[in-house]
Image (tube, rainbow, N blue to C red):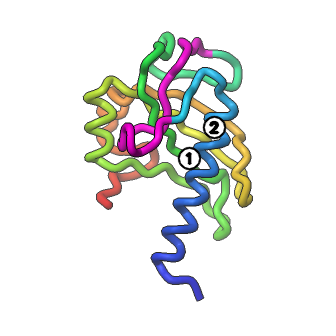
Amino acid sequence: MSTPSMQSASSKRAGERAESNVIDAVSELTYLPDTEVEHADAEVETTISPRAGLPTIALPVVEQGTLVEIKSAMVRLESGGHGRFYLRREQHEQVRADAGVYLFAVCEPTPDRSVLALKFVAATSLDEIGAGPGGDWRDE
C-alpha cells in the first residue's frame, strides 16, 4: 500500500520527467536548477514566437531571458478523470513579480510523460481569473 509521502515522491518524479520532456521539446528553453531559481524551471534562451503546437495567451512573443515555470498534467488520470494543473500562490507571486510565464503541458498518462500539447500563458493573465486554471490555489 502506498503512503502519501510515497505518492508525493512519485508525483515529484513524474513532474520532473514532464519538465525534462518539455525542455527537450522547446529548443529555445534552457533548464534552471532549483539552486539557481526556486520558482522557475527554465529560462528563454532565444525569443519564442507563437507557432503551431506552441501557442501563447496574452503574449505576442516570449522574450529572451524570461523565466518559465512549467506546469504539467496528465490528459487522463488512472481514475478516469481529467488531469489538473496546480498553482501555488506564493510561487505564482514570485513568477508574476519576475514578469515570468507559465508553460502548461498536457502529458500522456504513462511513466515517460510524453508531451501532447503545450501553451505559454503570461503569469499576470492568471490574476484575472483569481486562481489556477481549472481550480483553486494549492497552498502546500
Mark 1 residue crowding within 10 angstroms, few (<14) / some (14–19) / many (20+)? many
Residue that protrudes farthest toward the bottom in the picture: 1
Compared with residue 77, is residue 68 higher up or lower down, i.e. above or below? above
Mark 1 / mark 2, whichever is N-terminal:
2
Q: Which residues are magenta?
A: 32-50
Is 37 a magenta residue? yes
Mark 1 falls on what kind of element? Answer: strand
Q: Nearer the viewer, residue 15 or 76?
A: 15
Residue 47 is drawn in which quadrant? top right
Q: Residue at the location (72% across, 60% down)?
A: 111
Compared with residue 32, is residue 58 higher up or lower down, i.e. above or below? above
Tell whether 75 sits left or right of 11: right
Picture coordinates of residue 70 (x, y %)?
Answer: 51, 39
Q: Quadrant of the C terminus?
A: bottom left
Residue bearing mark 2: 22
Compared with residue 20, is residue 47 higher up or lower down, i.e. above or below? above
Q: Residue at the location (59% across, 89% down)?
A: 1
Separation of disc 1 and disc 2 at Cα?
9 Å
Mark 2 falls on what kind of element? Answer: helix
Q: How many marks?
A: 2
Q: Main secondary structure of the magenta part?
A: loop
Q: Nearer the viewer, residue 75 or 30?
A: 30
Tell whether 28 sits left or right of 100: right
Proximity of marks 1 and 2: CB atoms separated by less than 8 Å: yes
Q: Residue at the location (73% across, 54% down)?
A: 112
Picture coordinates of residue 42 (x, y %)?
Answer: 49, 33
Disc 1 residue type (three-letter): Ser
Residue bearing mark 1: 72
Picture coordinates of residue 10 (x, y %)?
Answer: 57, 67
Disc 2 residue type (three-letter): Val
